[in-house]
Image (cartoon, rainbow, N blue to C red):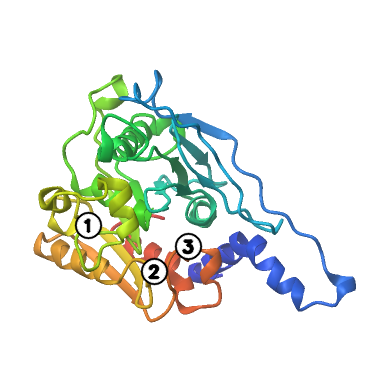
Amino acid sequence: MPDVNRRGLLIMGAAAPALAPALAGALPASAKVQTVAPPDPTEVVRLWPNGAPGGEGVTVVPIVPERSTDPAYRDRYAQYTTDPIMTVMRPDKPNGSAMLLIPGGGYRWAVLDKEGFDVARVFAASGTTCFILRYRLPADGWSAGADAPLQDAQRAIRLIRSRAGEFGVRTDRIAVLGASAGGHLAGLASARTDAAYAPVDAADAASLRPDLTVLMYPVATMADPHVHAGSRTHLLGETPSAERIAAYSLEKMNWNGAAPVFLLHAMDDVSVPVENSLMLLSTLKAATVKAEAHVFQEGGHGFGIRLIQGRPAAVWPELARAWAARLDFAL
């Protein structure tokens, strides 16, 4: 079977639990079968052995509400995280690549399934070892403020790289995928060369830079008129200065020497305008960063994997894989 067909079947297989309700609706009542969401992986890695840094003033209590009422899929979000973790999803046949997945949520929370577990299952199906990040949020009282999520992302990359042998991945094949505000965080992790925290153990001797970056409908700019206002407020506060806005706008950063970047966005995204990706693409071109962008006519915002089935943007995992393969990076 040609490789593209095999991968297409893998995508369909990974998405099957989410598609089941629609398929069941077309069957006679006697033929309907109850489906349930696949179980979560059980392997979890704590990021900080002695607690996350700068938490002396943190009083929030973590919650993980479930929004889905359909047993075929889950839709959880993590809010007020105090003990950041990575959930490891190991493939049946590892190809040596790793992917850190950073879900979005406007820096208010992190959606765990739609842009985390659901996406991870698709890439794990083709051999990538996936790590779903549950990160701290900037407005919860951490002394690092806006850099608290970045501390978690940088620490996660270093842990994956320093323990590459344990996870069965190559130290030079570590990708990061971020969606929406998670795309902003993934962009920070890709563009920033400075560590946002003091070393805590030997793992922090490893490089904090990803080898490949995938940004799904990313929050890029913190400036009007194309900013996602909620992300800016939760990251920088109600009235950030012009200097702070510029410092956290991805299109204003120095991307020289950054890893290759893959961008995808929908033209009809009314939450995070497509200009976020277009402005960032111009910056990447000026910095001679290898980059590819796919702009779909329709798709809206936050489509992940499940919500885009049957629409043109559903091909995005295959587009990302093909692009990565041209860079000798298996996804």
The numbered mark, 3 or 1, whose residue comes first in the sequence reads 1
Q: Residue at x 32, y 54 (%)?
A: 231
Contact? badges 3 and 1 (CB < 8 Å): no
Q: Amino acid at mark 1?
A: Met
Q: Residue at x 34, y 21 (%)?
A: 56
Q: Which residue is mark 3?
A: 304
Residue 84 appears in the rendering: yes
Q: What distance separates the C-alpha of mark 3 from that of mark 1?
A: 23 Å
The quadrant of the rendering that contains the C terminus is: bottom left
Which mark identifies residue 222? 1
Q: Is residue 1 left or right of residue 34?
A: left
Which percent across, then down, holds residue 52?
A: 37, 26
**Residue that lies at the very extreme toward the right in this rendered image:** 30
Q: Residue at x 28, y 70 (%)?
A: 293
Estimate how packed mark 2 is, as few (under 14), some (14 to 19) or many (20 or more) residues with alpha carbons within 10 Å.
Answer: some
Above or below: residue 227 compared with residue 190: below
Above or below: residue 101 compared with residue 284: above
Residue nearest the observer in this picture, 35 or 75: 75
Residue 329 appears in the rendering: no
Q: Amino acid at mark 2?
A: Leu
Q: Residue at x 56, y 70 (%)?
A: 1
Which mark identifies residue 319? 2
Q: Is residue 147 left or right of residue 310?
A: left
**Residue that lies at the very extreme toward the bottom in this rendered image:** 297
